Image (cartoon, rainbow, N blue to C red):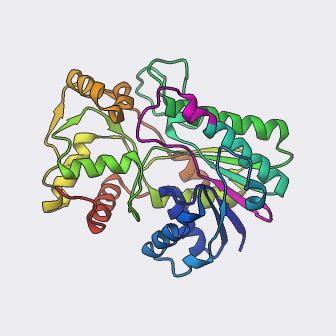
Amino acid sequence: MSEVLVTGGSGFIAVHTILQLLAARHRVRATLRSLDRASEVRAMLRRGGAANAGAVAFHAADLTSDDGWSAAAAGCDYVLHIASPLPDYVPKNADELIVPARDGTLRVLRAAREAGVKRVVLTSSFSAVAYGHPPRTTPFDEADWSDLAGPDVQPYPKSKTLAERAAWDFVTREGAGLELVSICPVAVLGPVLGPNFSPSIALVQALMQGRAPLAPKIHLGLVDVRDVADLHLRAMTAPSASGERFLAVAGPPLSVIEIAAVLRLRMGEAGRCAPRFEMPNWLARIVALGVPQLRDVKPLLGLRRAATSDKARRLLGWNPRPNDEIIIATAESLSRLGLVRP
């Protein structure tokens, strides 16, 4: 039994990670920007099956301030740094994402180092691996980094790349023995436990609600949030994980129209509104001009970025769920919570 701090405790990945930490009988702390959300997080944990949701201790801490981080990390064996800004729009100024992501990561690492934490597991992203590169047929792996000088790299990939780069530089220069592991998930789907969720989940919701009569020609790698949480726990304790990056991807990328087909085939009435046809790229670019939430998908049109999770499978024994199971688990949870109304 170890003392583990999870940052961004109200987030989709964080809640599922806390569930697995509790099930493994770890003592868990979590940071929130406001302690007013503690009851909401406990409700999500109970919805996820945790009988001991009340055992989680919450600390107020924000990525943009030094306040609270020392107290949150004090006495912890491990820190799982999952918190990161993820807006539902593309900011005009990239620093709105870059500064809190990078500086917040450094705040967490400093607090962990001063508290004598053994290892930090950082939740990075596939967007820190594969963006800004020309089309290629070989899959991306952990040796790859996004090229921020490449064309059409949006603020979110920049923020995740710079935050992870800063983390590795910090540990190399002034980590004082602190170990670091990074996890780089693709689009994270899976069981929704509350009303707040990521743009990836919102895509499935939009398909089920018929808000996307035509599917953009975009391909996404998928991974289940429960498998992302499992990979965090494996990376937290495995001796072979120290100093390593791990891509989290379940299988080959799927197009949006393929995701829609799974919903129609497997979800019955709840999936009947999913689109049957694709949108031409020229039309998608025009639509994106008037829909801020779609602007960051323009560089993805027509691209198929494959990735491999062989390293996580080989070193950590990780075995993720298949793509169709991930999609259905997402859709069923949205329906169960009444978050889909065609």
**Looking at the image, which residue is at 19% across and 26% down?**
280
| Residue 333, position as x, y percentages in the image | 32, 64
Pick whichever, 32 or 119, lies toward us.
32
Residue bounds of the magenta highlight: 74-99
Q: Is 157 colored magenta in this rendering?
A: no
Pick whichever, 35 or 22, lies toward us.
35
In which quadrant is the C terminus drawn? bottom left
Q: For the view shown, which residue lies furthest in the right direction? A: 176
Quarter residue 25 falls in:
bottom right
| Residue 105, position as x, y percentages in the image | 67, 43
Q: For the view shown, which residue lies furthest in the bottom direction? A: 51
| Residue 337, position as x, y percentages in the image | 31, 67
Tell me: residue 199, above or below residue 237.
above
Quarter residue 168 falls in:
top right
Q: Give the side of residue 198 with respect to residue 274, left or right.
A: right
In which quadrant is the N terminus drawn? bottom right
Q: Give the side of residue 61 with respect to residue 177, left or right.
A: left
Quarter residue 320 falls in:
bottom left
**Looking at the image, which residue is at 62% across and 39% down?**
100
